[in-house]
Amino acid sequence: MFKKAALAALALCFSLSVPAFAEVESQQAQVGNLEMTWPVVHTKNKKADTMINKDIKTFMDDFRAGFVDRKFTSGRTWYETKYEDNQLVSLVLSDLRTQGGDNKVRTSAVVYELASGQRLPLSAFVRVTVADLNGYLANQCYNSSDVKIHPTKQVTRVPEDFFLNQDGSISILFQTDELGTLLDGPVYIRLSQPDLRDLNTRNPRA
């Protein structure tokens, strides 16, 4: 049921200018060699707040646990609010883990439904296959600086990490070195609104 609601909400939110019902607040902490910034989401629904912030805490807990377990010696976290309206909020959470001369970046892109607090899956917005994504690599793939790139690697999976854009497009995120180079950082394939309509027509619900 929430998939249908999410699709309807997305169509409405991208076509109208509406006030935001969620507030995304930055929290910061520095402990030793760790510099951490993360979002705290506030809505009109306390239960939804709890669910969303608990999910974000899972990302942060994994980062802290890696440091405690001495998997890296220094690091930082940051985030970006990609899209926000009265029904949805889209965030990209990132961390950098340094061990000696080795730097690793991990990124998670999430979309939450504000009314329920649920993290929405990619299939709530678009039905896409590995073959579909490979078809967009040549012309619709971008690096972490939003520069178009032409990867030599192929897509091997459909990620659940994605974010919404203000123009109604959706960006599907791949981890560093998965499609691009280390210098590219996390890369994404951007699907326009016509792409989304075409994919959902091409890949009907089972």
Image: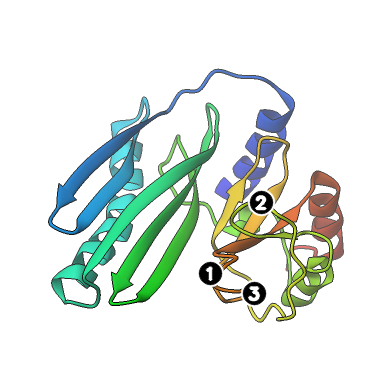
Mark 1 → mark 3, Cα distance in angstroms: 8 Å
At label 3, which amino acid type do we have? Leu
Q: Earlier in the sequence, mark 1 or mark 2?
A: 2
Residue at which label 3 appears: 179
Label 2 secondary element? loop
Quick one: 31 or 8, which is closer to the camera? Answer: 31
Q: Which mark is residue 146?
A: 2
Q: Which mark is residue 202?
A: none
Q: Is residue 143 visible?
A: yes
Where, quadrant-wise, is the C terminus in this rendering? bottom right
Residue at which label 1 appears: 175
Decide: marks 2, 3 in contact (CB < 8 A)? no
At label 2, which amino acid type do we have? Asp
Residue 13, percent from left and from top: 65, 30
Residue 128, percent from left and from top: 73, 66
Label 1 secondary element? loop
Q: Earlier in the sequence, mark 2 or mark 3?
A: 2
Mark 2 → mark 3, Cα distance in angstroms: 15 Å
Horizontal side of residue 13 vs 72, given as left or right = right
Mark 1 → mark 2, Cα distance in angstroms: 15 Å
Question: Badge 2, how many Cα within 10 Å: few under 14, some, many 20+?
Answer: few
Residue 19, percent from left and from top: 54, 18
